[in-house]
Amino acid sequence: MPTFNQTKLAAAGTAIFFFLALLLSVGVAGFSYYSVRNFEERAVWTQHTHTVLNALEEAHSTLRDIVGSARGYALSGNNEYRDNFEAGVRRLNALMHELRLLMQDDPAQLQRLSAIEYLLEQRLELARKLLELAPQAAQAQLLAGKALSDDIRASFADLKGRENALLAIRSQETADSARVTSLAVLGGSLLSIILLVAVYRKLRLEMAKRAEAQRKTQAYTAEIEDLYNNAPCGYHAVDETNKTIIKINDTELKWLGYTREQVVGKMTHADLLAPKSAERYARELLPQLLLKRELVSQDLEYRRADGSVFTALLNATAILNPDNGHLVSRTVIYDISERKHAEEAIETLNADLKRQALHLHNVNKELESFSYSVSHDLRAPLRAISGYAMILEEDFAAALQEKGREQLQVIRRNVRKMDDLINDLLKLAKSTTGDLAPERFAMGELVEQVIAGLRRENPHVVFDFDAAAMGSVEANRGLIAQVWENLLSNAIKFSSRSEQPQVRVTAEEGEDEIVYGVHDNGVGFDMRYAHKLFGTFQRLHRQEDFAGTGIGLALVQRIVIRHAGRVWAESRPKEGASFYFSLPTKGLLPGAAEQQ
C-alpha cells in the first residue's frame, strides 16, 4: 500500500507531467498558429495585388467605353449613348476611389495614380465636349484626344507592370510561407501523436474513476427517465413482431386513463384507438410504417378508458432492436383536441362565407340582368318618342307655332339625355362583368391616343403630359382607356370656363403601385362633399351648369377597384381639381379580378 509521501510524489509527478504536456501543446499550437497566420497574411496581400490589377483593367476598360459612348452620341445623337456615358463616368469615379483605397500602402503607386487621375480628367473633359457640340461639329472632333488616350494607356500599363512585379514577389513569399506552414503543421501533428500516446498511458491510470462515472451515469439515466415520463407529449414503443406495447410514458397513460400494468405487454396500439381510427391504422398507416419506417403528422382519434375520445397528432419511426432483431416502432402523439375544435369552427365559418359569396354573386347577376333589361326596354319607347317628335317637327312645321317647335326640341334633347344615361348604365354594368383579360402595355401610348381624340373636339385646351414617364402596366386596355377618357373629359368639362383651360397628366411609380393623376384649372369642388364623387348619379354641380349623367366617376371607380387599385380626388373651389387612381406595378394576381 503506498505511503502518504509516495501518493503525494505521484500526484506531484502527474501534475508536472500534465504541466509540461500543456506547455508543449501550447507551444506547438502557437507556432502552428503563427505560421498559418503568416501564410494567410501573405495570401491576403497576394489577393490584394490581384484586386488592384483587376480594378486597373476595369478602370481602363470603363474609360474606353466612356469615350466610345461619347463618340456614339456624336455620330448618332442617340440619348442612350449619353446615358451610358454618365453611367460610365460614375463607375470610373468609383473605380478610381477604390484604387486609391487599395494603394494606401504604396505611396509611389498612389503618386502614379494621381497622375493618371489628372490625365483622366482631361480626357473626360474632351469626351464631354462631344456631348455638348452639334452632331456635325462633334464629328469633326472625334479624333481629338488620341495622344491623351495613348498617355493614359501607357500610364495604366506602367501601373499594372509595377503591380505584376509586386505580385511575383508576394507570390514567392506566399509559397515560402506555405512550406513553413506545412512543416509547422507536420511537426505539430507528430508532437500531437506523441502527446496522445502519453495521454493514453495516463488515462489507464484513471480507470479507478469509472465507478464514480457509472454512478453519475445512473443518476443521469434516472433524470432522462423522469423527463421521458413527464414530457408534454405522449410516447410509447411497440414490438411489431407481436404488436404489443413494450413501453409507454406517464403523460400518455394520464391522457388515456390506464395504468402501466394494464397496457405494457397486454395491449396493442390499435387497442388505444377509436374504432374508425383503429381500422384506418391497421389498413393504411401500419403498412406504411413497416414499409417506409416513418409516419409524419397523422391525425387519429384515441379512446380513453372511460370511453371518451380525443384527437391526437401522430409521428412514428421504426428501427431494429439490436438485442433481438425485432422491429420496434416508436410513436409520439400530441393532444390537438383544441386545435381540432378550432379547425372545425373555421370550416363552419368558411362554409358560411362561401354561401354568402354565392348569394352575393347571384344578387349581382340579378342586378346586372335587371340593368340590361331596363336599359334595353327603355330604348324602344325613347326611339318612338324621338321619332314622333321628329315627324311632328317635319310634317306639321307649318301648323306649329314657334313655341310648339321649341317644345318638340326640348322633348328631343331630353330623349338624347335619357339615351346617354342608358348608355352610361350599360357601361357601368359591363365594367363589372366578363373576363378581365389583362395585358402588358405602355400607358403613355394609351393616354396619347385618348388625348388625340379629345384634342380634335377641344382644340383650345392645353394638355401637359410626358408619355415616357407613364410606365407600363398589366391591365385590361379597353377598360383603362375608359378610365382615362372619363377623367380627361371631366377635366375638360369643368375647366371649360377658364380663360385658358389646362389639363395636366402625371405619373408617380412607388414600390407596389403606380399613381396616375389628372389635374385641371377648372371650378373645383368642396372637399366636404368628396365622398359623393364616385357614387352613381351623384353630382356636385348643377345640370344646367355642367351637363352629364353622374355615372362617369362611378364607372372609373369600379374599373380601378376591379384592377386592385384605388381612386381618390383633391380640390378646392375655384382652384381646379386633381383626380388620382393607382394600379399595381406587378399586375393582377391570379383570380384577383374575379374577387373584386
Image (cartoon, rainbow, N blue to C red):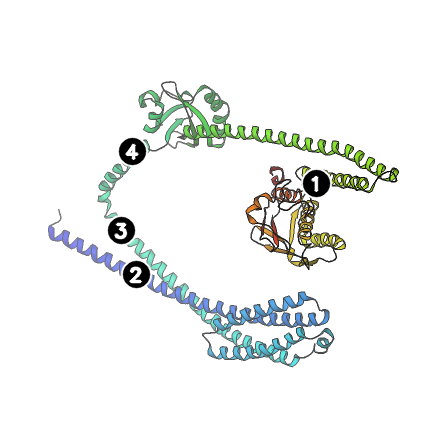
Residue 460 point in image, percent of width and height = 73, 58
Which residue bears the numbered disc 4?
226
Q: Are marks 2 and 3 in contact (CB under 8 Å)?
A: no
Q: Are marks 4 and 2 in contact (CB under 8 Å)?
A: no
Give the spatial CA distance, label 1 vs label 4.
78 Å
The amino acid on which the numbered mark 3 sits, given as a three-letter code, is: Arg
The amino acid on which the numbered mark 4 sits, given as a three-letter code, is: Asp
In the picture, the disc for residue 26 is: 2
In the picture, the disc for residue 201 is: 3
Which residue bears the numbered disc 1?
424
Residue 50 point in image, percent of width and height = 52, 68
Query: Can you say whether 473 is above or below 41 in the image?
Result: above
**Which of the two labelled residues, at mark 4 and mark 3, occupies the earlier sequence position?**
3
Mark closer to the observer (2, 3)? 2
Residue 566 point in image, percent of width and height = 59, 46
Residue lying at 72% horizontally and 38% vertically, measured from the top left: 422
Give the spatial CA distance, label 4 vs label 3.
38 Å
Give the spatial CA distance, label 3 vs label 1.
100 Å
Could you classify mark 2 by the number of other residues whose Cα lies within 10 Å: few (under 14), some (14-19), or many (20 or more)? few
Mark 2 secondary-structure assignment: helix
Could you classify mark 4 by the number of other residues whose Cα lies within 10 Å: few (under 14), some (14-19), or many (20 or more)? few
Left or right of 118 in this view: 32: left
